[in-house]
């Protein structure tokens, strides 16, 4: 998982909630700080609140991790400027344009040809399920008018092809159901 919020899990006092927890958050990363609830975290992007009021978590996802310049996490007693956050304050600072042109590119690959399989998987499934995941990304920033106006942009293309992915029908329609579908 290349979610930038996974960096928070490296900090003392931060606990990742298990997938069986009933706490839903946006972005797929759910964590508790200093024993507080997940909704006690305050998420900001460039100093502006970006909290999902209904389920907690970050509203605006950071799809391309290369757009992030820094990530600050305050886990102790916070200053009054933040408010509402008894757990943590997470501020994601994005990159911006400068007087010099700069950029980056990367390619991330994940596929069954490079992933190891457990002995249990080998016994139950003699052939590895087919999977190819690619992420191509890049950023570009620079001046529009020197010392006045700047630009910064990002592009990410993500493909994830795998065997047996997508929706599945749990049971085929009955004969009566098939007749209804044919006549529709």
Image (tube, rainbow, N blue to C red):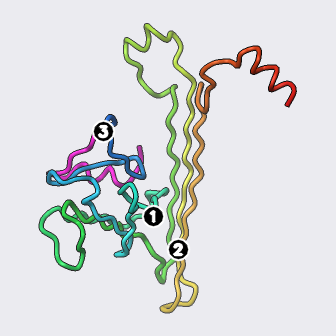
Stretch in magenta: 1-17
Please give the residue where the numbered disc 2 appears in the rendered image. 152
Please give the residue where the numbered disc 1 appears in the rendered image. 67
Q: Are marks 3 and 2 in contact (CB under 8 Å)?
A: no
> Viewer-proximal residue, 156 or 52?
52
Please give the residue where the numbered disc 3 appears in the rendered image. 21
Residue at image point 52% right, 57% down = 105
Q: Earlier in the sequence, mark 1 or mark 2?
A: 1
Residue, far left: 77
Q: How many marks?
A: 3
Q: Are marks 1 and 2 in contact (CB under 8 Å)?
A: yes
Q: Secondary structure at mark 1?
A: helix
Spot occupied by residue 62 in the image (x, y as percentages of width and height)? 45, 59
User: In the figure, is residue 59 to the left or right of 184?
Assistant: left
Where is 102 relative to 55, above or below? below
For marks 1 and 2, give the CA distance.
Answer: 9 Å
Spot occupied by residue 5 in the image (x, y as percentages of width and height)? 34, 54
Q: Quadrant of residue 170?
A: top right
């Amino acid at each position: 998982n290349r979610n930038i919020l996974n960096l928070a899990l490296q900090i003392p006092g931060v606990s990742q909630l298990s997938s069986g927890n009933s706490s839903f958050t946006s972005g797929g990363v759910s964590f508790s700080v200093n024993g507080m609830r997940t909704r006690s975290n305050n998420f900001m992007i460039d100093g502006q609140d970006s909290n999902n009021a209904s389920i907690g978590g970050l509203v605006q996802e950071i799809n391309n991790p290369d757009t992030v310049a820094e990530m600050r996490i305050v886990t102790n007693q916070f200053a009054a400027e933040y408010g509402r956050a008894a757990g943590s304050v997470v501020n994601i600072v994005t990159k911006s344009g400068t007087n010099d042109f700069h950029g980056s590119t990367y390619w991330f690959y994940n596929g069954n040809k490079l992933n190891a399989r457990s002995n249990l998987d080998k016994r139950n499934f003699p052939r590895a399920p087919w999977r190819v995941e690619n992420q191509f990304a890049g950023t570009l920033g620079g001046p529009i008018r020197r010392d006045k106006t700047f630009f910064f942009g990002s592009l990410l293309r993500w493909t994830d092809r795998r065997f047996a992915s997508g929706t599945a029908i749990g049971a085929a329609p009955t004969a009566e159901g098939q007749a209804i579908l044919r006549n529709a």
